[in-house]
Image (cartoon, rainbow, N blue to C red):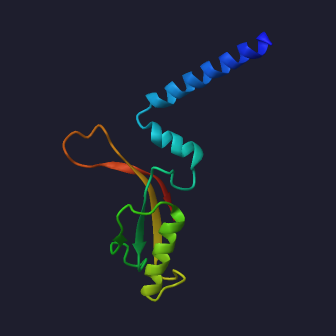
């Protein structure tokens, strides 16, 4: 029985050390999201839809606010936009769903810079 308690204590200690290691990174939320939600938004992230109605004019894009809870909702929104533009199968247009914007904490000059954790096309 003592062996099991010792192994349990070691496992708890190892988990605590691993937790501290993850928390010491710059964005622990981002690392956790990468581990468990590699192809969708984590519960605390939002998704931004980027829709290009015509691929031959890539500078003409429509970007939504980060309001979608997951990639499926983003995709549904973009498909509705494409249908409104007469392109329900996205033959002319394209889209991206940008998941989880993480601002760069080192930029202290008042500008907002950073990057998205995941871009799904």
Q: Residue furthest bottom?
A: 86
Closer to the camera, 99 or 45? 45
Closer to the camera, 115 or 46? 46
Q: How many marks?
A: 0
Q: Residue at x 39, y 63 (%)?
A: 67
Relative to 111, say whether 1 is above or below. Answer: above
Q: Residue at x 40, y 34 (%)?
A: 26
Q: Position of residue 43 (x, y in %)?
A: 50, 51
Closer to the camera, 80 or 106? 80
Q: Residue at x 54, y 56 (%)?
A: 40
Q: Position of residue 27 (x, y in %)?
A: 42, 38
Q: Is 108 on the left or on the right of 8, as rendered?
A: left
Q: Is 32 on the left or on the right of 66, as rendered?
A: right
Q: Position of residue 45 (x, y in %)?
A: 45, 52
Say which quadrant the N terminus sits in: top right
Q: Residue furthest left?
A: 109
Relative to 43, say whether 87 is above or below. Answer: below
Q: Position of residue 47 (x, y in %)?
A: 44, 60
């Amino acid at each position: 029985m003592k062996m099991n308690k010792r192994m349990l204590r070691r496992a708890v200690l190892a988990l605590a050390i691993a937790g501290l290691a993850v928390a010491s990174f710059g964005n622990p939320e981002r690392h956790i999201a990468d581990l468990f939600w590699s192809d969708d938004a984590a519960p605390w992230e939002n998704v931004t839809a980027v829709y290009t109605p015509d691929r031959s004019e890539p500078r003409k894009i429509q970007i939504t606010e980060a309001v979608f809870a997951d990639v499926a909702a983003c995709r549904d929104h973009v498909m509705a936009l494409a249908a409104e533009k007469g392109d329900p199968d996205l033959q002319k247009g394209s889209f991206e769903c940008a998941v989880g914007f993480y601002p760069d904490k080192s930029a202290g000059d008042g500008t907002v810079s950073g990057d998205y954790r995941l871009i799904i096309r």
